[in-house]
């Protein structure tokens, strides 16, 4: 099993959030006004937000018909003379089919940026994700494997790009205002004290209400207009200080996640439920299931206080289908992403999930499948 020391990232190139790290990488690669960046449909708005913040535009690539990641067969048709980079997301921690995408990128002279926000340990051909592309970025917010509160890091494979990122980081990125850091710290402790799978729905409601009141820092901004000033911020030092301790716990946490995945695999067997295809080297952030009665199941889960998440409810979560044009996505071009949104739910694998929570989720799923 990998030790934490084997992880490709370290805290040096740190940013306010994962999307700020992606923006830093794109900027260091020279992506700017009029340029295009390929990203997958079935993502969250953080990714196109970083592209827009460069003055560039996202171009969406549909996902595989039996999975959650970019379909390599759809990549080349989306490349044109203005394309400057490809962002490849390892959704839920399931490693993307990188080899053919890297081959296409090389043929077109395009950098590949790995979105490792969902997993730090998954592997492709015995290599840890994040080390195969030109650069990679990570996030440490509430839903991610390592929760620091908010924050992200970037890494680059070539010493030249790494040096450019380091120079930009030193010159252009400042520490967030103290009031913001304190707010994040309070949010971190509220989450640590309260969170357990049975309180998932309650915490979600409270968090949404508080972010509407702008008391809590939400996951999503309105797009359009000037980029947020967060795109010039480092990770909050108040949150950074727990980085070494959290990093040291990651290997044990990954082992716990692997065990829970095996339990889910054995127990979530019900009509109309499709389990994900995993490689055996994937370390997941959540266990995704495709179900036929998604809305009903979500309602039942809420009533029974069983944690069940809805990533992603739309191809660019949480932008409603009728507004996807505002981020440049034509839904007709991403039929697989739409299908996946209609059938996806996911279960937790974090350290507060026990064998008993797995059994409760399995019982709920079997009961709903029968009704
Ligand atoms: C969380 C996440 C990000 C970045 O999120 P931040 O909130 O900016 O840290 C990027 N991509 C994916 C797929 C994510 O889930």
Image (cartoon, rainbow, N blue to C red):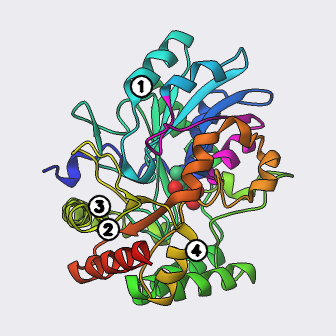
N-term mark: 4 or 2: 4
* Residue pointed to by mark 3: 247
CA gap between label 2 and label 1 equals 34 Å
CA gap between label 4 and label 2 equals 28 Å
* Residue pointed to by mark 1: 158
Q: How many marks?
A: 4
CA gap between label 3 and label 2 equals 17 Å
* Res. 66 image quadrant: top left
Q: Give the magenta-colored segment's residue range.
A: 44-71
- Which of 256 and 173 lies nearest the eye of the viewer? 256
- What SS does tag 2 mark? loop
Who's the residue at 28% across and 40% down the image?
Answer: 123
Left or right: 30 with respect to 15? right
* Residue pointed to by mark 2: 349
- What SS does tag 1 mark? loop
- What SS does tag 3 mark? helix
N-term mark: 1 or 3: 1
N-term mark: 1 or 4: 1
């Amino acid at each position: 099993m990998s030790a934490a020391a084997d992880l490709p990232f370290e805290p040096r190139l740190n940013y306010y959030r994962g999307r700020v790290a992606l923006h830093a990488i794109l900027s260091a690669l020279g992506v700017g006004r009029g340029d295009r960046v390929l990203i997958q449909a079935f993502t969250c708005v953080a990714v196109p937000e970083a592209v827009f913040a460069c003055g560039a535009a996202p171009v969406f690539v549909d996902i595989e018909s039996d999975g959650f990641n970019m379909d390599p067969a759809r990549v080349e048709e989306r490349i044109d003379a203005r394309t400057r980079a490809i962002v490849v997301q390892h959704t839920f921690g399931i490693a993307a089919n990188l080899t053919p995408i890297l081959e296409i990128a090389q043929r077109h002279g395009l950098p590949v940026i790995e979105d490792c926000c969902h997993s730090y340990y998954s592997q492709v051909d015995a290599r840890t994700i994040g080390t195969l592309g030109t650069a990679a970025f990570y996030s440490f917010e509430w839903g991610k494997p390592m929760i620091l509160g908010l924050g992200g890091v970037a890494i680059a494979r070539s010493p030249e790009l790494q040096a450019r990122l380091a120079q930009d980081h030193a010159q252009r990125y400042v520490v967030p205002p103290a009031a913001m850091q304190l707010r994040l710290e309070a949010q971190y402790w509220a989450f640590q004290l309260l969170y357990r799978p049975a309180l998932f729905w309650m915490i979600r409601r409270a968090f949404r209400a508080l972010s509407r009141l702008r008391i809590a820092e939400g996951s999503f901004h309105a797009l359009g207009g000037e980029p947020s000033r967060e795109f010039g911020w480092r990770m909050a030092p108040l949150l950074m200080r727990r980085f070494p301790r959290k990093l040291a716990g990651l290997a044990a946490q990954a082992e716990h996640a692997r065990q829970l995945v095996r339990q889910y695999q054995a127990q979530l067997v019900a009509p109309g439920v499709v389990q994900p295809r995993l490689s055996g080297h994937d370390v997941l952030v959540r266990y995704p299931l495709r179900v036929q009665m998604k809305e009903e199941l979500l309602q039942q889960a809420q009533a029974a206080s069983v944690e069940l998440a809805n990533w992603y409810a739309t191809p660019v979560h949480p932008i409603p289908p009728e507004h996807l044009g505002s981020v440049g996505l034509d839904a007709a071009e991403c039929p697989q992403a739409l299908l996946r949104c209609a059938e996806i739910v996911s279960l937790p694998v974090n350290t507060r999930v026990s064998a008993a929570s797995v059994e409760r989720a399995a019982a709920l799923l079997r009961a709903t499948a029968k009704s």
